[in-house]
């Protein structure tokens, strides 16, 4: 997809709004030219003795309706006309405004939903590497730039365009030469506005940058206030901030001053055009080439054109930013999501799990797992021990198809993993990640996050098993406590317990703790595992841990070093052989590594 | 918290006293404000004069066929509309920009100074985001209000005034018709502006919710994937995007009605003026040019009225921002040096170092009690005497009061009861800067500032030589990783130091404290993020540098503190055990228990190569 394709899609989806808005814009613009025309008619035909300047059709219509000369004797009808025109113009304005808002808001909604949906379906790997600030900016300010283009700027451009076209259409028939003289320097004003905004875009950028620098200094000072105080550096911080703030002032004021030049200059250029128009029309009227009505009309029309022309440069420069914004969105939307697999299977996942010579690496040249093979019987607990970077997390992530192995195969109940529907698999395999992310919702909503609705006993039960219920009930608002940015800050252990509880709310065939019991103390760790084991159906469980007390009770212990299984078996076997497991075992207190000795160290 | 502030409704009434105070703050720029007003008045009058030129052109030149004054007329038009108009418009825009940016700067830097004086208890209550807003967009709003809002109002008033003067001069009957339309126009304008601003605020609120939702969607994407929550997330997002769409369309109905309604009223006025005016002109009581000029006024006069209504509502909107800033400026720090102290030792910004007594580092807590603002009591009747040069370790559970104790020593907070003596003198009898200039403080989450590594090490000793910087880095064994970086000491650390790892940041913050050459050292969890080997090296460095300095160490890794002169186990704001490592181990109390369990886990973590802290103990 390209930027122009995306823009076309947005415009096509809302074509009816834009086409209608276009028609109303034409109406509105025409109506604006009517009042001066009525004044001119009054001056020439009714106050003076010139011929009527209204279209013959209109005059005949009046005569037919009210009788000849009725209009001339009832001048109040002109007042009625003015009010009617204002109503037409107002209605057109109203519909133009609401229609373009509808169009642009629809487009913005489409983009927001599409980006959000797309981001969610991008592969796990993308999110591991992504720069969140940049992506966020694309979803917010870039979409906003496009929305503004589709509402204000499109309208502005159309309006200016029709103003010029209709003005020319009305002015040229009166007298082409005088019209052209009346608008003689308008192209210059237009070019000047184009040139100017292009020229100063640099100043705008520098001003934005200076603001960013100042905010950074401010933010660093505020977050580092302890350091500032502890070193008695308030004075030098003030100097630093004032320097940044001065620069910001200088840049901002610079923009204001060049804008002052622009608006001042373009204003007087516009006025110069009006004076020229006055001079030309006066001379023509004196010579009798045009009437006084024509003179009023031409000068009014000229001055009506000046403001939109002066604005054009800015609008066009701003529109340039839209292309950049579109490109930034397209870049994300073109990143491949996890592919759809319509033929994927949804088998019962209660069979044995087989890792068959599995090899995997984030970059194929550097394998993280090499030739890993093992088999787990349904209902067994598998514990994995290994140093940082040995591939423990990667191994369990493969089970949710967050990544695909490069070699070998993983089978559950004989079905190769890659044949199993991804979402189905993730629904049936509970994975508690190492870093628990909670949503800014209440604790209740966080625990019941995977289901649209959940009953309280169910939630209580999950919280109970995860040993979360105590601290939840102790907190002032209980389950209704808000978590995250808008609410309370939970400790790492509390977050982890809620993350465990929310995973337990699902119906899991396989449960994986990716070092996710580390933030809870040993006793809670044991409690959680005991509670899990006491269920009626035994779930196949994978636990990554470094606690011997946790590891020792597993049916199968895998020792992973540098992506290879260096030892496997049960506790009793492993402590008999030299190696990592025995070393850790000895460090942790040897034979009496029972949970009782691992008292909670601190609160 | 920030949310609640966003949701604050705008004050209903315009508070004149508040804006008077804002004007007081802008005092240095009164001259410019005055000049700017002159420009605005000039501009208003010039614009109001334009229809008169049309009148002259029609009546005196075209109708009479008199070309004698044509040259003069064009000359005058050029002077008024081109030359003077440019001067007035440029002057006004330039001056308004000047006022906007300078007022903004003045208030912002004043606020910043105030923030440098306010104690930590203030920061405890105020989220950083909130303070950021106050010193960025809030001050900008005040600048804009003074630079543009106030002056727009002046322009509109004078334009209206001048227009009405000439309208009355042309024909008072017609002028009265126009005048009569002002009340309904103002009523409509205020009615709409108020609602439009309320709408605008609501939309902004939903917008910030959408931003938050995107943020969460991006940050939590991995979790959402493992929980297969994409569909539900999408639904929630669609609700929000649907809401902002609905609200925006709703708002556009209002704003699209506003302008037509105003022009509708104006068209009635125009219609009345025109039909009546043509009648008067036909009767010969008014000239053709006057009629044209009058219509010219009528077509334009609702612009300034709209402007006046807009300015008022804008001021109402900005009032909340001004209030927030003024509240900040009015906040009195609750830790403040007394007048006598300031006279003798200088204030935070102008120290009188010549009067500062040297500091030895003897620290004494006398019957100290401390309560946080929210009433939570942390310390009660706490006594402690530390001789100059001793190393004291504090051990205990989170919330036991360890950090409070060191914060009190640093005078980030003051005791709510009892005294803290430094070298035998209550530290409130010395200036804050005296103490803080002699502190070395290393935090668990090291905070660096944008700039190079050298800049950061030099933070508290601006005139330290490159050699001194290097020595400090060597002392904490930071030079190894620094030299591996492409630009060595000149490497940019990024915003908040985020281009370095936590461990690296910790080493830099260590070097920064050492170069400061403090008498009192505070290490709050300072080595939790470095691996054991580095920690050992820092340990040696600390022992060397701490010699002769009083130091307080808070550490969860107990291996860090084995060599302390005294270890205090803190429990509920009390010292429950005190002694050297050997003594406490021998006593087989709480410390012994902590030590043995933790020691095992620490060693396993080392074996597994993990450099993370032991989360179970944080």
Image (cartoon, rainbow, N blue to C red):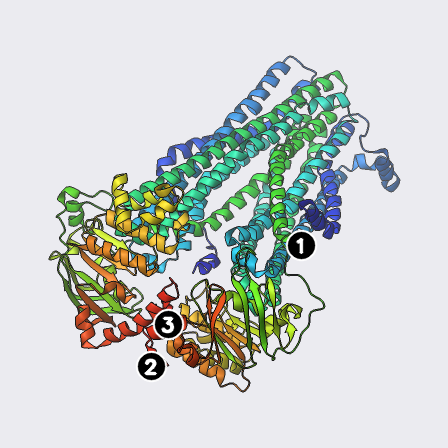
| Mark closer to the chain start, 1 or 3 | 1
Along the line of sight, which residue is nearer the eye, B389 or A222?
B389
Task: Using the image, tell me which numbered label, if any, was put on residue A584.
Answer: 3
How packed is label 1: few (under 14 Cα within 10 Å), some, or many (20 or more)?
many
Give the class, few, some or many, for how many residues have Cα within 10 Å of label 2's Cα (few <14, many ≥20). few
Task: Chain letter for mark 1, please.
Answer: A
Q: What subunit carries mark 2?
A: A
Judging depth in this view, the residue of B398 and A91 nearest the camera is B398
Q: Residue at x 51, y 85 (%)?
A: A535
Marks 2 and 1, the one that precedes in the sequence: 1
Marks 1 and 3 sit apart, C-alpha to C-alpha, by 60 Å
Instruction: List the residue tagged with mark 2.
Output: A592
- Reply above or below: B437 against B390: above
Location of the C terminus of chain A by quadrant is bottom left
Query: Total of numbered circles in the picture?
Result: 3
Q: Nearer the viewer, mark 2 or mark 1?
A: 2
Task: Classify mark 3: residues with Cα within 10 Å, few (<14), some (14-19) or many (20+).
Answer: many
Q: Chain of mark 3?
A: A
Task: Residue at the far left: name it.
Answer: B424
Residue B221 percent location from the top left of the image = 55, 62
Secondary structure, mark 1, is: helix
Front one among A566 and B92: A566
**Looking at the image, is mark 1 or mark 3 nearer the viewer?**
3
Mark 2: which secondary structure?
A: helix
């Amino acid at each position: 997809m390209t930027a122009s394709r995306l823009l076309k899609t947005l415009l096509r989806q809302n074509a009816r709004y834009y086409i209608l808005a276009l028609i109303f814009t034409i109406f509105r613009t025409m109506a604006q030219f009517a009042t001066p025309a009525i004044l001119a008619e009054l001056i020439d035909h009714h106050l003076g003795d010139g011929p009527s300047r209204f279209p013959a059709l209109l005059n005949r219509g009046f005569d037919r309706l009210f009788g000849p000369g009725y209009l001339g004797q009832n001048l109040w009808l002109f007042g009625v006309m003015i009010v009617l025109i204002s109503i037409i113009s107002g209605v057109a304005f109203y519909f133009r405004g609401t229609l373009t808002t509808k169009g642009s808001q629809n487009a913005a909604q489409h983009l927001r939903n599409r980006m959000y949906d797309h981001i969610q379906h991008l592969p796990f790997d993308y999110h591991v590497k992504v720069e969140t600030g940049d992506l966020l900016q694309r979803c917010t300010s870039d979409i906003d730039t496009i929305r503004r283009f589709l509402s204000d700027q499109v309208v502005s451009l159309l309006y200016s365009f029709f103003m010029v076209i209709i003005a020319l259409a009305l002015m040229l028939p009166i007298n082409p030469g005088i019209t052209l003289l009346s608008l003689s320097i308008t192209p210059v004003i237009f070019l000047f506005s184009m040139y100017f905004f292009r020229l100063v875009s640099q100043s705008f950028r520098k001003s934005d940058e200076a603001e960013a620098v100042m905010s950074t200094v401010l933010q660093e000072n505020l977050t580092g206030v302890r350091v500032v105080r502890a070193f008695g550096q308030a004075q030098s911080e003030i100097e630093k901030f004032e320097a940044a703030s001065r620069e910001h002032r200088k840049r901002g004021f610079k923009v204001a001053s060049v804008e002052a030049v622009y608006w001042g200059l373009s204003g007087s250029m516009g006025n110069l055009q009006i004076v020229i128009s006055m001079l030309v029309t006066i001379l023509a009227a004196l010579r009798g080439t045009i009437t006084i009505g024509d003179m009023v009309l031409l000068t009014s029309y000229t001055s009506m054109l000046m403001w939109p022309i002066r604005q054009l440069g800015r609008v066009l420069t701003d529109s340039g930013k839209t292309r950049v914004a579109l490109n930034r969105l397209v870049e994300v939307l073109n990143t491949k999501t996890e592919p759809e697999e319509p033929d994927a299977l949804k088998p019962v996942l209660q069979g044995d799990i087989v890792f068959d010579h599995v090899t995997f690496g984030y970059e194929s040249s550097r394998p993280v797992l090499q030739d890993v093979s093992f088999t787990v019987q349904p209902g067994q607990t598998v514990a994995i021990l290994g140093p940082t970077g040995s591939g423990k997390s990667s191994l369990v992530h493969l089970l949710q198809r967050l990544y695909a192995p490069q070699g070998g195969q993983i089978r559950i109940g004989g079905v190769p993993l890659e044949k199993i529907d991804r979402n189905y698999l993730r629904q049936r395999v509970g994975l508690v990640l190492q870093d628990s992310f909670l949503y800014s919702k209440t604790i209740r909503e966080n625990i019941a996050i995977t289901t649209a609705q959940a009953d309280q006993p169910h939630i209580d039960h999950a919280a109970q098993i995860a040993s979360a219920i105590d601290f939840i009930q102790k907190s002032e608002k209980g389950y209704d406590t808000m978590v995250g940015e808008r609410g309370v800050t939970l400790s790492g252990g509390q977050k982890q317990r809620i993350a465990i509880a929310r995973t337990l709310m699902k119906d899991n065939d396989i449960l994986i703790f990716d070092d996710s019991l580390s933030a809870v103390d040993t006793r809670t760790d044991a409690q959680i595992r005991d509670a899990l084991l006491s269920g009626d159906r035994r779930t196949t469980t994978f636990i990554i841990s470094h606690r011997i007390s946790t590891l020792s009770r597993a049916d199968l212990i895998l020792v992973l070093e540098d992506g290879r299984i260096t030892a496997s078996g049960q506790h009793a076997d492993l402590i008999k052989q030299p190696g990592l497991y025995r070393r850790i075992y000895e460090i942790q207190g040897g034979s009496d590594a029972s949970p009782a000795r691992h008292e909670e160290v601190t609160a | 918290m920030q949310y609640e502030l966003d949701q604050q409704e705008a004050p209903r009434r315009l508070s004149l006293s508040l804006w008077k105070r804002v004007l007081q703050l802008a005092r240095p720029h009164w001259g410019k404000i005055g000049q700017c007003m002159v420009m605005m008045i000039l501009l208003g009058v010039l614009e109001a004069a334009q229809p008169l030129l049309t009148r002259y052109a029609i009546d005196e030149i075209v109708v009479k066929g008199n070309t004698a004054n044509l040259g003069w007329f064009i000359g005058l038009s050029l002077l008024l509309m081109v030359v003077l108009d440019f001067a007035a418009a440029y002057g006004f825009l330039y001056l308004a920009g000047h006022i906007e940016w300078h007022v903004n700067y003045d208030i912002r830097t004043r606020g910043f100074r105030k923030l440098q004086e306010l104690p930590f208890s203030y920061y405890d209550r105020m989220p950083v985001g909130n303070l950021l807003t106050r010193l960025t967009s809030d001050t900008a709003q005040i600048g804009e209000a003074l630079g543009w809002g106030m002056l727009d109002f002046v322009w509109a008033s004078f334009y209206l005034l001048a227009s009405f003067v000439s309208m009355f001069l042309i024909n008072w009957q017609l002028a009265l018709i126009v005048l009569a339309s002002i009340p309904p126009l103002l009523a409509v304008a205020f009615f709409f502006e108020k609602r439009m601003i309320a709408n605008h605020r609501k939309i902004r609120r939903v917008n910030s919710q959408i931003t938050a939702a995107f943020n969460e969607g991006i940050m939590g994407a991995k979790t959402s994937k493992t929980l297969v929550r994409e569909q539900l997330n999408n639904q929630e997002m669609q609700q929000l995007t649907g809401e902002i769409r609905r609200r925006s369309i709703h708002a556009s109905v209002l704003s699209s009605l506003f302008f037509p309604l105003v022009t509708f009223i104006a068209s009635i006025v125009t219609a009345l003026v025109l039909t009546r005016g043509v009648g008067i002109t036909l009767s010969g009581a008014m000239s053709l040019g006057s009629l044209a000029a009058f219509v010219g006024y009528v077509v334009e006069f609702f612009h300034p009225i709209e402007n006046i209504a807009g300015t008022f509502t804008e001021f109402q909107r900005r009032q909340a921002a001004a209030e927030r800033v003024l509240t900040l400026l009015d906040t009195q720090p609750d830790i403040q040096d007394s007048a006598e102290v300031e006279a003798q030792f200088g204030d935070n910004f102008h120290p009188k170092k010549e009067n500062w007594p040297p500091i030895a580092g003897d620290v004494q807590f006398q019957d100290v009690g401390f309560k946080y603002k929210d009433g939570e009591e942390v310390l009660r009747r706490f006594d402690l005497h530390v001789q100059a040069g001793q190393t004291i370790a504090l051990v205990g559970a989170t919330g036991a009061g360890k950090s409070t104790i060191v914060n009190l020593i640093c005078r980030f907070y003051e005791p709510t009861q009892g005294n803290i003596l430094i070298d035998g003198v209550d530290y409130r009898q010395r200036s804050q800067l005296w103490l803080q200039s002699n502190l070395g403080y290393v935090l668990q989450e090291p905070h660096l500032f944008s700039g190079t590594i050298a800049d950061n090490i030099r933070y508290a000793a601006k005139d330290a030589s490159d050699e001194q910087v290097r020595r400090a880095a060597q002392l904490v064994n930071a030079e190894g990783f620094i030299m591996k970086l492409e630009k060595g000491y000149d490497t940019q650390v990024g915003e908040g130091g985020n281009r370095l790892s936590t461990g690296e940041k910790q080493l830099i913050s260590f070097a920064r404290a050492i170069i400061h050459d403090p008498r009192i050292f505070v290490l709050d969890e300072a080595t939790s993020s470095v691996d054991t080997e580095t920690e050992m090296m820092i340990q040696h460095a600390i022992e060397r540098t701490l010699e002769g300095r009083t130091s307080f160490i808070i550490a969860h890794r107990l291996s860090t503190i084995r060599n302390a002169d005294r270890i205090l186990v803190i429990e509920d704001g009390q010292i429950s055990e005190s002694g050297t490592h050997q003594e406490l181990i021998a006593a087989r109390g709480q410390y012994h228990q902590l030590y043995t369990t933790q020691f095992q886990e620490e060693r396993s973590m080392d074996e597994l190569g993990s450099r993370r802290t032991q989360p179970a103990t944080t």
